[in-house]
Image (cartoon, rainbow, N blue to C red):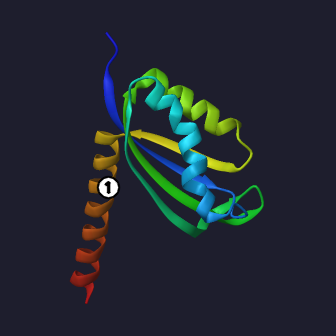
Amino acid sequence: MTHIHQYELMVILDPEVDERQVAPKLDGFLKVITADGGSIDNVDVWGKRRLAYEIQKKNEGIYAVVNFTATSEATQELDRQLKLNEQIMRTKVLRAEEAIAQVAAEKERAEAKAARKAAKA
C-alpha cells in the first residue's frame, strides 16, 4: 500500500523569471502530483529575496513554497523534474512533520538566544 503524506516544497527560481509566471510554471510541474491522485493544498509565491549565498553566480532568487499531499513516488518524480529545469535554482522537499519540527527548533534557538542576550543586559 502506498502511503500518502503531506509535504512542503520550497523552490528558488531564477530571478530573471517574471514573477507572474511563477505560479503557472509551478502548476506544470505539480501535475505530476495531481495525476497520481495527490492534492495541492497551497502555493505561496514569496517573490524575489536575497539569497544567503550565491547560487549559479546569482545573489537573488524568487522563492515559492508549495504545500501538497502525495505519495513519496510522485514527490520524488516532482523533485527530479524540478532539478532538470534550468530556471529552478534550488528545491527542497520536506515532509510536513519535518518542516513543522524545523520551524519549532528554529524558534527555540531564537528564544534561547534572546534569553541569553537579556541575561547579559
Quadrant housing the C terminus? bottom left
x, y percent for residue 90:
61, 48
Rendered residue at 51%/38% (across/down): 30
The residue lying toward the viewer, choosing from 24 and 108, is: 24
Quadrant housing the N terminus? top left
Residue 103 versus residue 18 in the image, above or below:
above
Q: Which residue is mark 1?
A: 103
Rendered residue at 73%/63% (across/down): 16
Residue 56 versus residue 80 in the image, above or below:
below
Rendered residue at 65%/38% (across/down): 83
The residue lying furthest to the right in this view is 57
Tag 1, which secondary structure? Answer: helix
How many numbered marks, from 0 up? 1
x, y percent for residue 106:
33, 59
Rendered residue at 62%/57% (across/down): 21
In this picture, residue 119 sits left or right of residue 15: left
Kind of residue sitting beneath label 1: Val
The residue lying furthest to the top in this view is 1
Residue 10 versus residue 28 in the image, above or below:
below
The residue lying toward the viewer, choosing from 79 and 69, is: 69
Q: Residues within 10 Å of mark 1 (few under 14, many from 20)?
A: few
x, y percent for residue 101:
28, 47
